[in-house]
Amino acid sequence: MGEDTTSVRVDAWIWAVRLAKTRSAAAAACRAGHVRVNGERAKPAQALRPGDEVRVRQPGRERIVVVSKLLRKRVGAAVAAECFVDNSPPPPPRELTVAVPVRDRGAGRPTKRERRDMERLRGRP
């Protein structure tokens, strides 16, 4: 399963415990400044040790986890959940999230009148 070592790369651990879908997505999040380890911005190759606090900013929320076990390889969701303590605030209810309007396929660009109607719905002058 997972090998217990003294340290592991941040991007590999985020991917292994399923906080990111791919390792490259985890590395991109690190490079973009969306990952913090113990309050400091993390580079993808930064060493991670048990007891470190990792904050991962994801669309719509921030995940705050404390590392309890190190992993190098991706594991199942049940095993991954045992490798960290989740201190994240609960996600916002779906009713409070902003719904993105979707146009019908093939409808093309909105006309000037439709754009004005959409802006009026959003509360813009």
Image: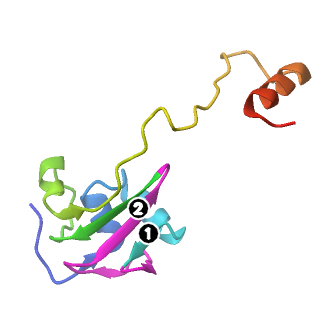
Q: Nearer the viewer, residue 1 or 116?
A: 116
Residue 121 % position (x, y): 75, 27
Q: Is residue 28 left or right of residue 23?
A: right
Image coordinates for residue 108, horizontal then vertical, percent: 78, 20
Q: 50 left or right of 99?
A: left
Q: Give the farthest residue toward the right.
A: 112
Q: Which residue is mark 2?
A: 26
Q: Is residue 52 above or below residue 32?
A: below
Q: State the quadrant of the N terminus.
A: bottom left
Which residue corresponds to the image point at 43% horizontal and 77% vertical from the top-left? Answer: 42
Q: Is residue 55 shown in magenta?
A: yes
Question: Contact, CB < 8 Å: mark 1 with mark 2?
Answer: yes
Residue 72 versus residue 48: which sits nearer the camera?
48
At 38% from the left and 67% from the top, the residue drawn is: 55
Mark 1 residue type: Val
What residue is disc 1 on?
35
- Which percent across, then down, holds residue 21? 36, 50
Image quarter for residue 68? Answer: bottom left
Amino acid type at image mark 2: Ala
Report helix, strand or loop for mark 1. Answer: strand
